[in-house]
Structures are given as C-alpha cells and as structure tokens.
Image: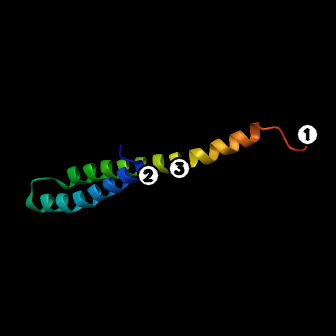
Amino acid sequence: MISLADQVTEARRELALRKVVYGKQVKRGTMTEGQAAYHLAAMAAIVETLTRLDLEQRQLPCLGLIALEKSLPSPLS
C-alpha cells in the first residue's frame, strides 16, 4: 500500500511535470491554453485533496486520545 504522504509527493511531482509538458504542447498547438488550464487545475485539486486527507489522517490518532481521555472518569471523583 502506498501511504498518503507518498501519494501527495507523487501527485506534486506529476503536477510539476504536467506544467512543463502542457506548456510545450500549447506552444506546439497540440493543446489549447484552456485545456492545459483545466487539466492543471484538476491535478492541483487532486494534490489539495490528498494533502488534506493526509493531514486529517495524521490528526485522527490525536483526536482519538482526546476522546478517550474525556470518556475516562476524573481522577478527582
């Protein structure tokens, strides 16, 4: 299984690569600026989603401990 952190890294690498490739395709006329902008925006959204999911996943263990702590009886009771 590939971790979310590694997926984010790969998605960022892919976005950087696409910027270069799409720029060349637009210059050659094999892709319009609108097409390039759309596909780059879609890939940027993927990076953003994966980044958010990775951050949320990393916070889950902390939130679980907080919930567990709140469910335990107070030592002063």
Q: Amino acid at mark 1?
A: Ser
Q: Secondary structure at mark 2?
A: helix
Q: Is the residue under label 3 in contact with that under label 1 (CB below 8 Å)?
A: no
Q: CA distance from mark 1 to mark 2?
A: 42 Å
Between 65 and 45, the one lying in front of the other is 65
Residue named by callout 1:
77
Q: Quadrant of residue 22?
A: bottom left
The dot on residue 51 is: 2
The quadrant of the picture occupied by the C terminus is top right
Q: Secondary structure at mark 3?
A: helix
Residue 65's disc number:
none
x, y percentage for residue 73? Answer: 82, 38
- Residue found 50% across the figure and 51% down from its top: 55
Mark 1 or 2: in front is 1
> Closest to the observer: 67 or 38?
67
Task: Return the x and y of residue 24 as percentages of the image width and height.
Answer: 14, 62
